[in-house]
Amino acid sequence: MARIRIQDRSCPNESCPDFDQAGQGNIVVHGFAKLQRDRRRRYRCTSCGKTFNSTRGTPYYGLQCSQRSFELVVRMSVEGMSKSSIARITGLSWNTVARWLERAAAAAVRFNEAMMWGYELKELQADELRTFVGRRDDPTWVFTAIEVWSRLWVSKVVGRRSYRNTRILILTAIRRGLLHYVLLVTTDGFVYYKRVVERHVGHGCVYGQVMKTWRKNRVVKVDRVLIIGSGWQLEEALSRSEDSTQLNTSFIERLNLTLRQGSAYLNRRTPCHARCAGRLEDQVELFRCYYNFVRPHRALKFGELTKTPAMQAGLMSRKLTFRDIFTWPLAGLLLVVVLVDCRRASGKMEPVSRAA
Protein backbone atom coordinates (compact mmCIF):
# COMPACT_ATOMS: atom_id res chain seq x y z
CA MET A 1 0.00 0.00 0.00
CA ALA A 2 1.28 3.47 -0.88
CA ARG A 3 2.04 5.50 2.24
CA ILE A 4 2.29 9.27 2.12
CA ARG A 5 5.48 10.30 3.89
CA ILE A 6 5.30 13.19 6.32
CA GLN A 7 7.70 15.23 4.17
CA ASP A 8 5.32 14.81 1.22
CA ARG A 9 2.38 16.30 3.11
CA SER A 10 1.38 19.93 2.90
CA CYS A 11 -0.85 22.19 4.93
CA PRO A 12 -4.48 22.23 3.65
CA ASN A 13 -5.22 25.61 5.28
CA GLU A 14 -5.55 28.17 2.49
CA SER A 15 -4.60 31.06 4.79
CA CYS A 16 -1.32 29.36 5.78
CA PRO A 17 1.88 30.83 4.22
CA ASP A 18 2.97 27.24 3.41
CA PHE A 19 -0.38 26.22 1.96
CA ASP A 20 -0.08 23.27 -0.45
CA GLN A 21 3.74 23.31 -0.32
CA ALA A 22 5.28 19.94 0.48
CA GLY A 23 8.78 19.46 1.83
CA GLN A 24 8.84 22.66 3.93
CA GLY A 25 9.38 20.81 7.23
CA ASN A 26 6.33 22.46 8.80
CA ILE A 27 4.24 19.28 9.25
CA VAL A 28 4.64 17.33 12.52
CA VAL A 29 2.80 14.38 14.08
CA HIS A 30 -0.09 15.37 16.37
CA GLY A 31 -1.44 12.16 17.91
CA PHE A 32 -4.53 10.23 16.80
CA ALA A 33 -8.21 10.95 16.26
CA LYS A 34 -10.50 8.26 17.72
CA LEU A 35 -13.36 6.96 15.62
CA GLN A 36 -16.07 4.45 16.50
CA ARG A 37 -14.13 1.43 15.23
CA ASP A 38 -10.80 2.86 14.17
CA ARG A 39 -8.40 5.73 14.67
CA ARG A 40 -6.73 8.18 12.31
CA ARG A 41 -3.31 9.81 12.51
CA ARG A 42 -3.41 13.59 12.84
CA TYR A 43 -0.81 16.16 11.84
CA ARG A 44 -0.15 19.78 12.78
CA CYS A 45 1.26 22.61 10.71
CA THR A 46 3.83 24.61 12.70
CA SER A 47 3.37 27.64 10.43
CA CYS A 48 -0.33 28.23 11.17
CA GLY A 49 -0.99 25.86 14.07
CA LYS A 50 -3.87 24.08 12.32
CA THR A 51 -4.32 20.30 12.65
CA PHE A 52 -5.64 17.94 9.98
CA ASN A 53 -6.39 14.26 9.46
CA SER A 54 -4.13 11.78 7.65
CA THR A 55 -6.94 11.11 5.16
CA ARG A 56 -7.24 14.77 4.21
CA GLY A 57 -7.14 15.05 0.41
CA THR A 58 -8.21 11.44 -0.17
CA PRO A 59 -11.67 9.92 -0.80
CA TYR A 60 -11.57 8.49 2.73
CA TYR A 61 -11.76 11.92 4.38
CA GLY A 62 -14.82 12.35 6.60
CA LEU A 63 -16.04 8.76 6.33
CA GLN A 64 -17.93 7.44 9.33
CA CYS A 65 -16.97 3.86 8.54
CA SER A 66 -13.89 1.82 7.67
CA GLN A 67 -11.86 2.32 4.54
CA ARG A 68 -12.45 -1.33 3.71
CA SER A 69 -16.20 -0.71 3.44
CA PHE A 70 -15.56 2.17 1.04
CA GLU A 71 -13.31 0.00 -1.14
CA LEU A 72 -15.88 -2.82 -1.10
CA VAL A 73 -18.53 -0.48 -2.53
CA VAL A 74 -16.15 0.63 -5.28
CA ARG A 75 -15.19 -2.94 -6.17
CA MET A 76 -18.83 -4.03 -6.33
CA SER A 77 -19.53 -1.12 -8.68
CA VAL A 78 -16.73 -1.98 -11.14
CA GLU A 79 -17.86 -5.61 -11.13
CA GLY A 80 -21.19 -4.62 -12.68
CA MET A 81 -23.49 -4.12 -9.68
CA SER A 82 -25.94 -1.24 -9.62
CA LYS A 83 -26.12 1.31 -6.83
CA SER A 84 -29.43 -0.09 -5.63
CA SER A 85 -27.98 -3.61 -5.41
CA ILE A 86 -24.92 -2.34 -3.53
CA ALA A 87 -27.15 -0.46 -1.09
CA ARG A 88 -29.28 -3.55 -0.39
CA ILE A 89 -26.26 -5.82 0.17
CA THR A 90 -24.20 -3.45 2.31
CA GLY A 91 -27.10 -1.92 4.23
CA LEU A 92 -26.08 1.60 3.20
CA SER A 93 -28.41 4.19 1.78
CA TRP A 94 -28.52 4.76 -1.97
CA ASN A 95 -27.36 8.36 -1.52
CA THR A 96 -24.32 7.22 0.48
CA VAL A 97 -23.34 4.75 -2.22
CA ALA A 98 -23.74 7.41 -4.92
CA ARG A 99 -21.66 9.92 -2.93
CA TRP A 100 -18.88 7.41 -2.32
CA LEU A 101 -18.71 6.46 -5.99
CA GLU A 102 -18.45 10.13 -6.95
CA ARG A 103 -15.45 10.47 -4.63
CA ALA A 104 -13.85 7.33 -6.03
CA ALA A 105 -14.40 8.48 -9.62
CA ALA A 106 -12.81 11.87 -8.91
CA ALA A 107 -9.73 10.13 -7.49
CA ALA A 108 -9.60 7.78 -10.50
CA VAL A 109 -9.72 10.73 -12.90
CA ARG A 110 -6.75 12.39 -11.18
CA PHE A 111 -4.81 9.13 -11.10
CA ASN A 112 -5.43 8.37 -14.79
CA GLU A 113 -4.49 11.91 -15.78
CA ALA A 114 -1.16 11.64 -13.98
CA MET A 115 -0.22 8.06 -14.85
CA MET A 116 -1.39 7.54 -18.42
CA TRP A 117 1.74 8.93 -20.09
CA GLY A 118 4.74 7.40 -21.81
CA TYR A 119 3.34 4.04 -22.91
CA GLU A 120 4.67 2.48 -26.11
CA LEU A 121 2.38 2.51 -29.14
CA LYS A 122 2.59 -0.38 -31.59
CA GLU A 123 -0.94 -1.31 -32.60
CA LEU A 124 -3.96 0.87 -31.86
CA GLN A 125 -7.60 -0.19 -32.21
CA ALA A 126 -10.57 2.12 -31.71
CA ASP A 127 -14.31 1.54 -31.56
CA GLU A 128 -17.43 2.93 -29.95
CA LEU A 129 -20.42 1.42 -28.15
CA ARG A 130 -23.91 2.81 -27.97
CA THR A 131 -25.93 3.58 -24.86
CA PHE A 132 -28.31 6.32 -23.78
CA VAL A 133 -28.64 8.85 -20.98
CA GLY A 134 -32.12 9.65 -19.75
CA ARG A 135 -34.04 8.94 -22.96
CA ARG A 136 -33.68 6.00 -25.29
CA ASP A 137 -34.23 8.14 -28.38
CA ASP A 138 -31.16 10.26 -27.54
CA PRO A 139 -28.16 7.93 -28.00
CA THR A 140 -24.84 8.51 -26.23
CA TRP A 141 -21.63 6.89 -27.44
CA VAL A 142 -18.62 5.68 -25.45
CA PHE A 143 -15.50 5.88 -27.63
CA THR A 144 -12.64 3.58 -26.58
CA ALA A 145 -9.10 2.97 -27.83
CA ILE A 146 -6.75 0.14 -26.82
CA GLU A 147 -3.05 -0.52 -27.33
CA VAL A 148 -3.11 -4.15 -28.41
CA TRP A 149 0.36 -5.27 -27.32
CA SER A 150 -0.12 -4.25 -23.67
CA ARG A 151 -3.97 -4.35 -23.64
CA LEU A 152 -3.78 -0.84 -22.17
CA TRP A 153 -6.99 1.18 -22.44
CA VAL A 154 -5.34 4.40 -23.56
CA SER A 155 -8.22 6.83 -24.09
CA LYS A 156 -11.97 7.22 -23.87
CA VAL A 157 -14.58 9.84 -24.78
CA VAL A 158 -18.25 9.91 -23.76
CA GLY A 159 -20.61 11.95 -25.90
CA ARG A 160 -22.09 12.23 -29.34
CA ARG A 161 -20.79 10.32 -32.35
CA SER A 162 -19.11 13.37 -33.85
CA TYR A 163 -15.89 14.42 -35.54
CA ARG A 164 -14.80 16.34 -32.45
CA ASN A 165 -15.09 13.36 -30.10
CA THR A 166 -13.37 11.10 -32.63
CA ARG A 167 -10.51 13.57 -32.88
CA ILE A 168 -10.15 13.80 -29.09
CA LEU A 169 -10.04 10.00 -28.80
CA ILE A 170 -7.30 9.48 -31.40
CA LEU A 171 -5.14 12.47 -30.48
CA THR A 172 -5.26 11.72 -26.75
CA ALA A 173 -4.08 8.17 -27.39
CA ILE A 174 -1.24 9.24 -29.69
CA ARG A 175 -0.01 12.34 -27.87
CA ARG A 176 0.34 10.53 -24.55
CA GLY A 177 2.30 7.62 -26.03
CA LEU A 178 5.74 6.96 -27.50
CA LEU A 179 6.20 5.95 -31.14
CA HIS A 180 9.19 3.81 -32.09
CA TYR A 181 7.82 2.32 -35.31
CA VAL A 182 5.13 3.07 -37.84
CA LEU A 183 1.86 2.75 -35.93
CA LEU A 184 -0.78 0.25 -37.04
CA VAL A 185 -4.27 1.70 -36.56
CA THR A 186 -7.47 -0.31 -37.09
CA THR A 187 -11.07 0.88 -36.72
CA ASP A 188 -14.50 0.11 -38.05
CA GLY A 189 -16.02 1.91 -41.01
CA PHE A 190 -17.22 4.99 -39.13
CA VAL A 191 -16.55 7.91 -41.49
CA TYR A 192 -14.89 10.28 -39.01
CA TYR A 193 -12.09 7.83 -38.16
CA LYS A 194 -10.76 8.12 -41.68
CA ARG A 195 -10.87 11.92 -41.64
CA VAL A 196 -9.12 12.21 -38.28
CA VAL A 197 -6.35 9.71 -39.04
CA GLU A 198 -5.66 11.16 -42.49
CA ARG A 199 -5.53 14.72 -41.19
CA HIS A 200 -3.68 14.33 -37.88
CA VAL A 201 -1.58 11.18 -38.31
CA GLY A 202 -1.21 10.84 -42.06
CA HIS A 203 1.64 8.74 -43.40
CA GLY A 204 3.05 8.23 -39.94
CA CYS A 205 0.85 5.17 -39.61
CA VAL A 206 -0.63 2.22 -41.46
CA TYR A 207 -4.39 2.55 -41.25
CA GLY A 208 -7.05 0.05 -42.17
CA GLN A 209 -10.78 -0.41 -41.62
CA VAL A 210 -12.72 -3.57 -40.84
CA MET A 211 -16.33 -3.32 -42.06
CA LYS A 212 -18.84 -6.01 -41.13
CA THR A 213 -22.11 -6.75 -42.87
CA TRP A 214 -24.86 -7.95 -40.54
CA ARG A 215 -27.94 -9.95 -41.43
CA LYS A 216 -30.42 -11.27 -38.86
CA ASN A 217 -28.00 -10.46 -36.01
CA ARG A 218 -25.18 -12.42 -37.66
CA VAL A 219 -22.04 -11.28 -39.42
CA VAL A 220 -22.28 -12.54 -42.98
CA LYS A 221 -19.40 -10.61 -44.54
CA VAL A 222 -16.18 -8.93 -43.39
CA ASP A 223 -14.37 -6.43 -45.64
CA ARG A 224 -10.85 -5.24 -44.80
CA VAL A 225 -9.79 -2.02 -46.53
CA LEU A 226 -6.29 -0.50 -46.36
CA ILE A 227 -6.71 3.30 -46.23
CA ILE A 228 -3.17 4.55 -45.52
CA GLY A 229 0.01 2.68 -46.39
CA SER A 230 1.03 0.07 -48.92
CA GLY A 231 0.76 -3.69 -48.84
CA TRP A 232 4.37 -4.25 -47.78
CA GLN A 233 4.03 -1.66 -45.00
CA LEU A 234 0.98 -3.53 -43.72
CA GLU A 235 2.84 -6.83 -43.79
CA GLU A 236 5.76 -5.29 -41.93
CA ALA A 237 3.44 -3.81 -39.27
CA LEU A 238 1.64 -7.13 -38.84
CA SER A 239 4.96 -8.96 -38.53
CA ARG A 240 5.88 -6.69 -35.60
CA SER A 241 2.51 -7.35 -33.96
CA GLU A 242 2.53 -10.17 -31.42
CA ASP A 243 -1.24 -10.64 -31.60
CA SER A 244 -2.58 -9.86 -35.08
CA THR A 245 -2.03 -11.69 -38.36
CA GLN A 246 -4.52 -9.53 -40.29
CA LEU A 247 -6.51 -6.34 -39.84
CA ASN A 248 -9.01 -6.85 -37.03
CA THR A 249 -10.91 -5.09 -34.26
CA SER A 250 -11.19 -8.14 -32.00
CA PHE A 251 -9.32 -6.66 -29.06
CA ILE A 252 -11.26 -3.40 -28.84
CA GLU A 253 -14.53 -5.29 -29.22
CA ARG A 254 -13.52 -7.56 -26.34
CA LEU A 255 -12.71 -4.47 -24.27
CA ASN A 256 -16.16 -3.09 -25.01
CA LEU A 257 -17.73 -6.35 -23.85
CA THR A 258 -15.69 -6.21 -20.63
CA LEU A 259 -16.84 -2.62 -20.13
CA ARG A 260 -20.48 -3.59 -20.58
CA GLN A 261 -20.10 -6.40 -18.06
CA GLY A 262 -18.32 -4.16 -15.56
CA SER A 263 -20.75 -1.23 -15.61
CA ALA A 264 -24.41 -1.50 -14.67
CA TYR A 265 -25.08 1.58 -16.80
CA LEU A 266 -23.91 -0.19 -19.97
CA ASN A 267 -25.49 -3.62 -19.55
CA ARG A 268 -27.91 -4.50 -22.32
CA ARG A 269 -31.62 -4.40 -21.45
CA THR A 270 -30.93 -2.96 -18.02
CA PRO A 271 -33.15 -0.60 -15.98
CA CYS A 272 -29.97 0.91 -14.46
CA HIS A 273 -29.19 3.36 -17.24
CA ALA A 274 -27.56 6.67 -16.34
CA ARG A 275 -29.77 9.67 -15.69
CA CYS A 276 -27.05 12.20 -16.50
CA ALA A 277 -23.93 12.16 -18.68
CA GLY A 278 -21.62 13.07 -15.80
CA ARG A 279 -22.42 9.92 -13.85
CA LEU A 280 -21.89 7.76 -16.91
CA GLU A 281 -18.52 9.36 -17.59
CA ASP A 282 -17.47 8.96 -13.94
CA GLN A 283 -18.37 5.27 -14.00
CA VAL A 284 -16.44 4.68 -17.24
CA GLU A 285 -13.37 6.50 -15.90
CA LEU A 286 -13.48 4.53 -12.64
CA PHE A 287 -13.70 1.26 -14.53
CA ARG A 288 -10.85 2.36 -16.81
CA CYS A 289 -8.62 2.89 -13.78
CA TYR A 290 -9.64 -0.51 -12.41
CA TYR A 291 -9.06 -2.23 -15.76
CA ASN A 292 -5.59 -0.76 -16.35
CA PHE A 293 -4.07 -0.82 -12.87
CA VAL A 294 -5.97 -3.23 -10.59
CA ARG A 295 -7.46 -6.08 -12.60
CA PRO A 296 -4.99 -8.74 -13.90
CA HIS A 297 -5.48 -9.60 -17.57
CA ARG A 298 -5.68 -13.29 -18.44
CA ALA A 299 -3.98 -12.70 -21.79
CA LEU A 300 -0.95 -11.27 -19.95
CA LYS A 301 -0.06 -14.39 -17.99
CA PHE A 302 3.65 -15.24 -17.99
CA GLY A 303 4.31 -18.36 -15.96
CA GLU A 304 2.88 -17.80 -12.49
CA LEU A 305 2.69 -14.03 -12.96
CA THR A 306 -0.44 -12.45 -14.41
CA LYS A 307 0.13 -8.80 -15.25
CA THR A 308 -2.20 -5.85 -15.46
CA PRO A 309 -2.14 -3.77 -18.67
CA ALA A 310 -0.25 -1.02 -16.82
CA MET A 311 2.44 -3.53 -15.80
CA GLN A 312 2.78 -4.78 -19.37
CA ALA A 313 3.03 -1.20 -20.66
CA GLY A 314 5.76 -0.37 -18.14
CA LEU A 315 3.71 2.19 -16.22
CA MET A 316 3.72 0.13 -13.00
CA SER A 317 5.95 -2.56 -11.54
CA ARG A 318 3.16 -4.36 -9.68
CA LYS A 319 -0.59 -4.77 -9.46
CA LEU A 320 -2.20 -1.94 -7.53
CA THR A 321 -5.15 -1.92 -5.16
CA PHE A 322 -7.81 0.71 -4.69
CA ARG A 323 -6.05 1.70 -1.46
CA ASP A 324 -2.91 2.41 -3.49
CA ILE A 325 -4.83 4.55 -5.96
CA PHE A 326 -6.84 6.53 -3.41
CA THR A 327 -3.84 7.27 -1.17
CA TRP A 328 -1.17 7.70 -3.82
CA PRO A 329 1.14 10.62 -2.90
CA LEU A 330 0.50 13.66 -5.03
CA ALA A 331 4.24 14.37 -5.10
CA GLY A 332 4.79 10.94 -6.59
CA LEU A 333 2.21 11.59 -9.28
CA LEU A 334 3.82 14.87 -10.28
CA LEU A 335 7.26 13.23 -10.37
CA VAL A 336 6.02 10.55 -12.75
CA VAL A 337 4.55 13.18 -15.08
CA VAL A 338 7.82 15.13 -15.08
CA LEU A 339 9.85 12.00 -15.86
CA VAL A 340 7.50 11.04 -18.69
CA ASP A 341 7.68 14.54 -20.14
CA CYS A 342 11.49 14.31 -20.05
CA ARG A 343 11.36 11.00 -21.91
CA ARG A 344 9.08 12.55 -24.53
CA ALA A 345 11.44 15.49 -24.96
CA SER A 346 14.53 13.27 -25.25
CA GLY A 347 13.90 12.61 -28.93
CA LYS A 348 11.61 9.60 -28.92
CA MET A 349 8.58 11.81 -29.38
CA GLU A 350 7.93 15.52 -29.53
CA PRO A 351 6.50 16.99 -26.32
CA VAL A 352 2.98 18.23 -26.87
CA SER A 353 0.30 20.06 -24.95
CA ARG A 354 -1.84 17.88 -22.69
CA ALA A 355 -5.00 19.52 -23.97
CA ALA A 356 -6.68 17.38 -26.58
Image (cartoon, helix red, strand yellow):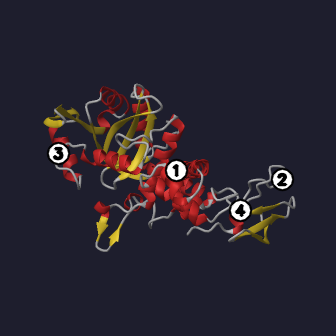
How crowded pointer 3 is (Cα within 10 Å; few <14, some 14-19, many 20+) is rated as few
Left/right placement of residue 14 relative to residue 197 reads right
Q: Nearer the viewer, residue 46 or 199?
A: 46
- Residue tagged 3: 246
Q: Residues within 10 Å of mark 4 (few under 14, many from 20)?
A: many
Mark number displayed over residue 84 = none
Q: Nearer the viewer, mark 1 or mark 4?
A: 4
Q: Left or right: 63 with respect to 156?
A: right
Mark 1, secondary structure of its residue: helix
Q: Residue at x 38, y 63 (%)?
A: 296
Image position, residue 77 (x, y; %): 48, 53
According to the image, label 2 marks what residue?
Answer: 17
Separation of disc 1 and disc 4 at Cα? 24 Å
Q: Would you say 218 lies left or right of 253 here?
A: left
Q: Name which residue type carries label 1.
A: Asp
Using the image, tell me which numbered label, if any, was put on residue 9: 4
Q: What residue is shown with label 1?
A: 341
Q: CA distance from mark 4 to mark 3?
A: 51 Å
Residue found at the far left of this picture: 220
The amino acid on which the numbered mark 2 sits, given as a three-letter code, is: Pro
Relative placement, left or right, of 219 versus 338 is left
Amino acid type, residue under disc 4 in the picture: Arg
Is 86 situated above or below 276? below
